[in-house]
Amino acid sequence: MRYRTFGKIGFQVSSLGFGAMNLPGVPLEQAREALNYALDHGINYIDTAAAYRNSEEIIGECISHRRSEYFLATKTNKRDYATAKAEIERSLERLKTDVIDLLQIHYVNYVHEFKTAMEEDGAYRAAMEAKKAGKVRHIGITGHRPELLAKWIRKDQFDQVLFHLNLAQPFALDELIPELTRRDMGKVAMKPLSGGFIQPVEKAIRYPYSQDVHVIISGMVSAQEVKINIAAMEREVEDAEREELERLAMRLGTHNCRRCNYCSCPIGIPIPDVMISSNIRSEFGLLPKGSGFYEKHKEKIVSCADYEPCKEKPLCQQQCPYHLPMQSVIQKAAASY
């Protein structure tokens, strides 16, 4: 396992972090085995959030007795002071700990959300109070708009940022990662498989592993998945492989979707998933989870072309800050049926 100094935070973090978002979907004993296997094999960064169902409680139940062995990161998606403060206290109880190493203001994608969270009665004040009280050590932010995050960190109010970085979403490389490096901030990349779409798994993991990040958060639910992820990082990425991965990312990232979720489909199509997987699907095919996604949403995807309010001007495209051709991508997916 490779370890790196976590920017100005200073902690020596493992390159692979344990993403605990999906643990509520498996039996408790399976989650316990996965978490302890991860710690036993050198993973020392555990990522969760108050919004991930009972993920915090599972971590507290399964590994709080090993608290000194891991760096603990959680999140609040509340924007106002009172509810954020209450959620931080609840997270401490659920995680069975006296201190959270990193508390992140979670899923900030809109300018107005950021402003609200940073106001005098916003969530950031609650985070700062918890830090002054010794209940939180560091404060970070997460989001899906890398160009906005690059601007929001310039007042040095945060120690870390969590962002997407995978073969189909290389966009953090443009502005965000260089800005984080200049400010010596913690760089944490998430979704290396883009939610289960990118294959082969080893190639998917090795792309963010080849980039200038400290930790790659991979969602894992079993000891076997932990083993597979660790194996993908057993050797460093040499120049030739790095160049191949970067060429592939350029091809797979041409959809240009950041998963900011500004689009809202009136018939319920998960547009970002279709956009991001479009190039992956045509070049590599899909993992079982990706195939299951398309089967689940088949009826909605097929009905896109017949939805009358979107015939002349698609409603989703009017909301997209990147002006992407969503309708044509969705209809191309529908044609494959």
Image (cartoon, rainbow, N blue to C red):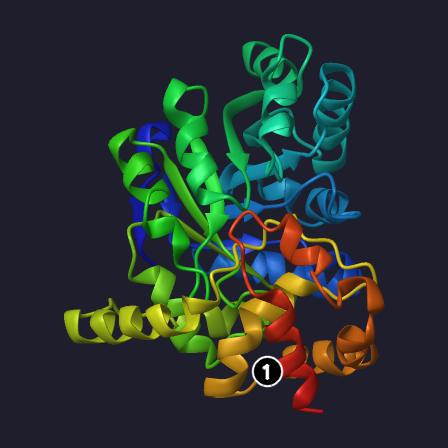
Is 149 drawn above or below residue 63 in the view shown? above
Q: Is residue 45 left or right of residue 119?
A: left
Towards the viewer: 78 or 216: 78
Q: Which residue is mark 1?
A: 287
Towards the viewer: 239 or 117: 117
Q: Is residue 230 left or right of residue 271?
A: left
Residue 10: which quarter of the image?
top left
Q: Residue at x 45, y 25 (%)?
A: 158
- Identify the image quadrant of the C terminus: bottom right
Q: Is residue 249 left or right of residue 321?
A: left
Residue 204 image point, x, y percent? 43, 72
Helix, strand or loop at label 1? It is: loop
The number of callouts visible is: 1
Outermost residue toward the front?
312
Q: Residue at x 76, y 36 (%)?
A: 94
Q: Is residue 311 left or right of residue 136?
A: right
- Identify the image quadrant of the N terminus: bottom left
Residue 240 image point, x, y percent? 17, 75
Is 302 drawn above or below residue 208 in the view shown? below
Residue 53 seen? yes
Towards the viewer: 102 or 39: 102
Residue 140 image point, x, y percent? 50, 30
Q: Residue at x 58, y 55 (%)?
A: 259
Is 21 drawn above or below residue 177 in the view shown? below
Task: Count residues near mark 1 (Cα–Cα under 10 Å), then give few for <14, some for 14-19, many for 20+.
Answer: some
Q: Amino acid at mark 1?
A: Leu
Residue 299: which quarter of the image?
bottom right
Residue 85 image point, x, y percent? 73, 19
Is 61 drawn above or below residue 140 in the view shown? below
Residue 44 seen? no
